[in-house]
Structures are given as structure tokens and as C-alpha cells.
Amino acid sequence: MRTRDIVTVGAFGLSALGGAMLVYGALVESKRLVLDKVDVPLPGLPEHLDGFKIAVLGDFHLCDKHSVELANKAIDMALDQDPDMVCLVGDFVNYWKPTSPWMIGEVLEPLLIMNGSVVAIPGNHDYKTGSPEILRIILDELNIKLLRNESWVHNGICWTGIDSYNEGAADVNKAFSSATSDPIIALWHEPDLVDMLPAGRALLQLSGHSHGGQFKFPFGLTPMTSTNGDRYRDGLYPDASTPIFVTRGVGTTGPPSRFLCPPQVAVLTLTSN
């Protein structure tokens, strides 16, 4: 076989392999919702919060019936763990359209059972063809607290929510100036900005945005990157300037596919040692 033919066959084979991977990722991996339980040791955590459970969900990217079905499963999976708090870390929609309020309501209505122990922040996609203030109206009806550069004390924790940096809406100083008690847990959609938090103020940051890279390959190769979601992509980073947990999220952007990076419901258990 001539060299040119070998190259042609090789290129065809790689293309076919890539296509098969995308199809598998769309039909199987993107729907293989997993529950990850993570112990989070936090020096300085008050003793009465030892064992406090937080369900972290994000990046629903609601856009059609399939995304709604997966998000419904994620909410049910989180509630089955009997968390003390549910944190929703942004990107509720892929972009706003007339059916978006219905989809958000359909997915989040079961959280009424949490009796107000649900906090949320916007993501960058919650600005696309709309505004997070639409989200606020919906979440208010569902007894979910939306934080945009503000703080809220609930269940013995000061939840400090920072708006989307990628959309030019973040105001860290404003958010922390309203934090009048400790301990503080910060919520910020874009994880790589954790170094912008005031040193020593927050015990933990919760983020999404990165989707874990959405596609993972051997040797740590992750070809898809997100602006301000590349350095911290997936899981717990206890040695960051402020310890940070990043969820892989539930939905997808770009190709509606995942590979070795399944959608996630994370349940964090805070520990004092």
C-alpha cells in the first residue's frame, strides 16, 4: 500500500472512531447520571456543622424534553440523599426561550420539599437571550434563594453568591461586604476565579461551568475547555487558595455528548477534621 493510501485509511479510521465516540457519548455517557459522595474536611468548621450535607447540582442547560428528563432524575437523586442544603451553581438554561420558565419549574418544583433550604446563583448561559432576573421570579415561587453578589444566612452558614464573571456581572467586594457572619461558603459559577476571593474569608467555594471537560481521554487529555473553567475542572481541590469543589454538572454544551465524564450529582459531607 502506498504511503498516501495508508494516510488516507488512517485518517478515515480516526474519523470513524471519533464519530462512534460522539454517538456513544450522546446515547449512553451523557445520560449515565452518577452520584458522587465526597467528604470535605474544613479546618475551622464549627462543630455543630460536622456532618452537614450539601447536594451540589449545576449546568442543567435546559433546552428540550431530554434535558428536562435528565435534570428531573438529578433532582430526585439529590433529594434521595436527604441533604441539609441544596446548592444550584448556575446555567439553568442553555439559552432563554418561551418554554424555559416551564422547564425550570418542572425540574425544580420537587425542591419545595426542602422548605427553603435551597440556594442558587446564575451562570453565564442564564444571560443568553434573557436575564437572571427572569430566573429570580421563577425561583421565588419555588422558595429558592437566588444570590447575585449578595449573602444570605441560612442553616448556620453564610452563603455568599457571586454573579457570572464571564458576563461582566461579578462584584466580589459587594458580595462579601454583605457577609455579616461566619462561616462563609461562596458560590461562583466560574471556578478558576477562586483566587479573587478575599483571603481567609470563605471556608469553601462551590462551582460548576467546566462540565469536567465533558470529554476525557488517557494521559489527562481534555480537549474541551471553558473560559475560567480550565484550571479547576472536576472534584475537590483542598489546596486552592480557598478550598473549592467543582461539579461536572448535569447537562452539556456544544456536542450533546460526553466521554468518560458522566453527568454528576454531588453530595458533600462537611467535616471539621
Image (cartoon, helix red, strand yellow):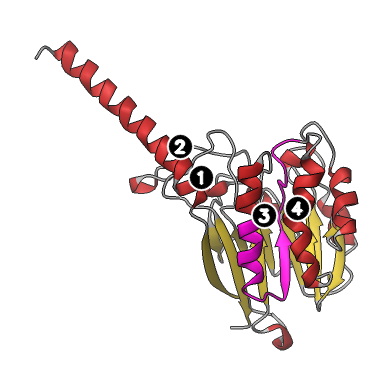
Q: In the rendered image, which quarter is residue 50 located in?
A: bottom right
Q: Which residue is located at x 76 percent, y 49 percent?
A: 104
* Res 213 label: 1
How far separated are the C-alphas under marks 2 and 1?
7 Å
The reply, left or right, for residue 137 in relation to residue 45 is right
Which numbered dot is residue 125? none
| Residue situated in front as seen by the camera: 165 or 55 | 55
Residue at image x 55%, y 44%? 230
Residue bearing mark 4:
106
Circle 4 residues within 10 Å: few <14, some 14–19, many ≥20: some
Q: CA distance from mark 2 to mark 4?
A: 33 Å
Residue 168 in the image: above or below residue 181: above
| Camera-nearest label, 1 or 4 | 4
For disc 2, the neighbor class at 10 Å (few under 14, some 14 to 19, many from 20) is few
Residue under pointer 3:
194
Instruction: Tell me, yes or no, whether the two marked residues, 2 and 1, touch with CB atoms within 8 Å.
Output: yes
